[in-house]
Image (cartoon, rainbow, N blue to C red):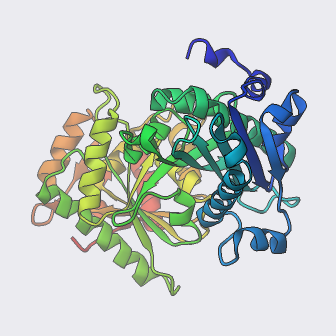
Amino acid sequence: MSTTKKLDTHRKALTLNLDPLIFGSFAEIGAGQEVARWFLVVGAASGTVAKTISAYDKEVSDDLYGSGSRYVSRQRLDAMLDREWAQLLSQLGKTRGSQTRFFCFVDTISARNYAGTNEAHGWIGLRFQQQPGGEPHDVVLHINLRDPTNILQQEAIGVLGVNLIYAAFHQTQTKADLFEGIAQDVEKRIEIDFVDLSGHAFEAWDQRELLVHLVLTGLAEAVCFPSSNPPLPPTEALYKKPLVLAPGYFVHVDRVHGEIHTRMLASAIRQLQRESAESKAPKGFFCLTNASSSANEPSLEASDLLCRIDALRSRGGDVLLFREQELYTLADFINRYTKDAVRFVVGLSVIIRTFEDRYSKLDGSLLRALSHLFAQNVRIYAYPMTAADLQKMIQSISATGWEWTETNGLVSARQLHPASPVGHLYEYLLASRFLIPIEEA
C-alpha cells in the first residue's frame, strides 16, 4: 500500500487509461456520469473506455434492463451488470479477448433530490477479469451518501468509482488493501454498509468478516446480519418499520443466556404490539458493538464479534452490529430509516450504565444524551434482573448510590432507586413513560 496509497484520483484514472490490457464500459444511473467523466477528462480515454451510458429515463432503463424491480436496488444492479457484461464480451470478445482484461462498472444511485427529502444511497457494481479470458469477478457495494448537496455527492461517487476500478486491478491482496483503496479520500463522505464479492480471487474471503471489517475500520455506521437470510444493507431491514432493539455485550453465548436474550426481545415485541394500534408487526434486532463490557478490557476482535453474532443468529435472532455503543447514537442511526415507534429493551445493567456514563463526547453530559435519545420516537423497555446479578454488575463498574428492593429474587425498574439528584431524573422518566418496566419475565 505504500506506493499505491499516494496516487490521487487523477493519477489512478490516468494509470488505468494508459494500461493497454484494461478495457471496459460504464453504465451509470443517477448522480450524473461522474465515474466515466474522470476517465474521459484525464486523457488517453480511448485506451480504457469502450462505452459509457446513462439510462436516466425509466422506460429506457426498463427496456435495457427489464422492469419489475426498484430502480435503486440490488436487483436492478445485477441486471445492469449482466446485460453490460454480455454486450461487452459479444462485441469485443473475439477481437480483444485474448489480450484484454475486461471490466464493466455500473451504478444506480439516488443522490440528494432538489427538496432534500429522499434517502441518499445507491448500489455500485464492478465485474472484471484478472487475466485475459479469465472468469469474471464481482464486487457489489451498497453505499450511503453523507455530503449535504447533490453536487458534492456526485463528486464523491466519481472518486469512489475510480478507486474501486483501480483497487480491483491493483489492490486485492488483502481485504484491508482493497477497502483502504476503495475508500481513499471519501472515508467521511460515503458509508459502505454492504459488500458482496464473488470469483476465485475472493473464495477465501468470508462475507461476514468483510462486513465486520467495514464497521471496525469506520467505513460503516452499522451492518446487518439476518438470522435466516444472507446479509443485506440496514436500510432494507429497517425501512419504515416499528422496531425493537436489544443492545448488549452478549458475552455469554451458552444456551441458558441465549434463552434469556431471546425471551427478553420477544417480551418487548409483545409489549410494543399491545401499545400500538398499527397493523405493522414490529421487527426485533439484537444490537452489539466492538466495545468490551469493561473499561479495563480491549475492544473486541472480529473473531469474538462473529462468535457472538453467530450465537444470536443460531437462535433465530436478527443482528445489527454498530460502530458506536451509546444508545443515542443507535437511535440517530435508526431514525434515518423509520418514523415508526422505536423501542430499546435492556436489562437493568444497561440502565445503570446509561446513568453512570460521563458522555465525554457531548457538551451537557447526561442531560444532553438523554434528551437526544428521547427527542424523537424512542422509548426504553426495562427488563427485570436478578438481585444477585445486579449486585455483581454494580460492583464490576464501581457504581455507587444505587439501592433496590426485590420480589422473589427479581428487581424491576420500579424497584431500582438511584441516589439524588439522578434519582429525580430517573423517577421523571418512569412517570413520563420514557422508561417502561416490562413486568413479563
Taking 28 as reference, is 133 left or right? Answer: left
336 in relation to 13, above or below: below
Taking 242 as reference, is 3 left or right? Answer: right
Residue 377 spot, x, y in % from top left: 57, 65
Taking 208 as reference, is 12 left or right? Answer: right
The answer to which image quadrant residue 4 occupies is: top right
Residue 261 spot, x, y in % from top left: 25, 60
Q: How many labels sit on residues?
A: 0
Residue 151 spot, x, y in % from top left: 86, 44
Q: In terms of depth relative to the viewer, which is nearer, 400 or 307?
A: 307
Give me the residue at 31% from left, 66% from top. Answer: 265
Q: In terms of depth relative to the viewer, which is nearer, 82 or 386?
A: 82
Give me the residue at 69% from left, 33% from top. Answer: 22
Q: In terms of depth relative to the viewer, which is nearer, 401 or 206?
A: 206
150 in relation to 234, above or below: above
Give me the residue at 37% from left, 38% from top. Answer: 290
Residue 126 spot, x, y in % from top left: 63, 46
**Camera sees residue 357:** yes
Residue at the top extreme, as displayed = 2
Taking 439 as reference, is 378 left or right? Answer: right
The answer to which image quadrant residue 84 occupies is: bottom right
Q: Quadrant of the C terminus?
A: bottom left
Residue at the front extreme, as displayed = 94
Q: Quadrant of the N terminus?
A: top right
**Camera sees residue 420:** no
Give me the residue at 68% from left, 30% from top. Answer: 21
112 in relation to 68, above or below: above
